[in-house]
Image: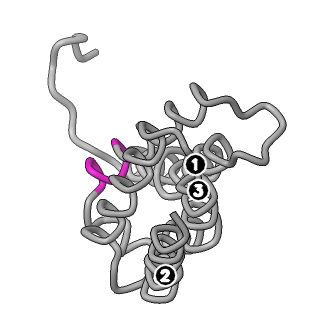
Amino acid sequence: PPSAHSARRPDADDAQRGEATEMLYGVPCMYWLLGGLAQLVDPAWSLASARSQQLGLRLINTALEAGGSAFSAAPPLVLVIQESVCKHLLHAAHTADSLLLSLALRAVFNLFCTVREHLKVQLEVFFNSMHLKLLNA
C-alpha cells in the first residue's frame, strides 16, 4: 500500500469532487453572500443599524475589490448586483451619516470599475439621484 506521503495521480473522483466543490463554494456561494450583504446594507431592514450597514458596505467593497472583473463573467452575480446591491446602495446613500455615504460611494466606484458594462441603467439612476440630492441641499 502507498504511504501517506506518496504522490498519487488524480482520477475521476478528484474531478467530481472538484465540480462539487465549485457548486458549493463558487458562484452560488457568492450569490448568497452578496444577497445577504445587500440586505445588511438596506436601511429598511428591521435589524439594520448604522454599524451593520457600515459592516455590509465594507464587506461589499472588499468582495468587489477582490473579485474584480470576475463578477462580469458570472451572470447570477451580475443579476444579484443589478437587483439587490444597487437598490440597497441607492437607499444607503441617502443618509446624513458621512461615513455611510463615503462607503456607499466607494462601493459605487468599485461597481463602476468592475461591472460597469452591466450596470448602465443602475449607475444612471444612482448618479441622477445623487445629483438631485445635491441640488436640494
Q: Nearer the viewer, residue 26 or 94?
A: 94
18 left or right of 83?
left
Q: Where is 100 relative to 115, above or below? A: above
131 left or right of 39?
left
Q: Residue at x 34, y 79 (%)?
A: 116
Q: Quadrant of the N terminus?
A: top left
Q: Which residue is mark 1?
A: 95
- Quadrant in the picture for residue 43: top right
Q: Which residue is mark 2?
A: 128
Callout 1–callout 3 Cβ contact below 8 Å: yes
What secondary structure do most residues of the magenta stretch adopt? helix
Q: Which residue is mark 3?
A: 94
Q: CA distance from mark 1 to mark 2?
A: 16 Å
Residue numbers of the magenta segment: 62-67
Q: Nearer the viewer, residue 1 or 63?
A: 63
The picture places residue 5, in percent across and down from the top left corner, at 17, 13
Please tell me how crowded label 2 is: few (under 14), some (14-19), or many (20+) other residues with Cα within 10 Å: few
Q: First in sequence: mark 1 or mark 2?
A: 1
| Element type where label 2 sits in the image | helix
Q: Where is 38 relative to 110, above or below? A: above
Q: Amino acid at mark 3?
A: His
- Quadrant in the picture for residue 71: bottom left
The picture places residue 124, in percent across and down from the top left corner, at 46, 85
Q: Amino acid at mark 1?
A: Thr
- The disc at residue 49 is none
Q: Residue at x 58, y 48 (%)?
A: 95
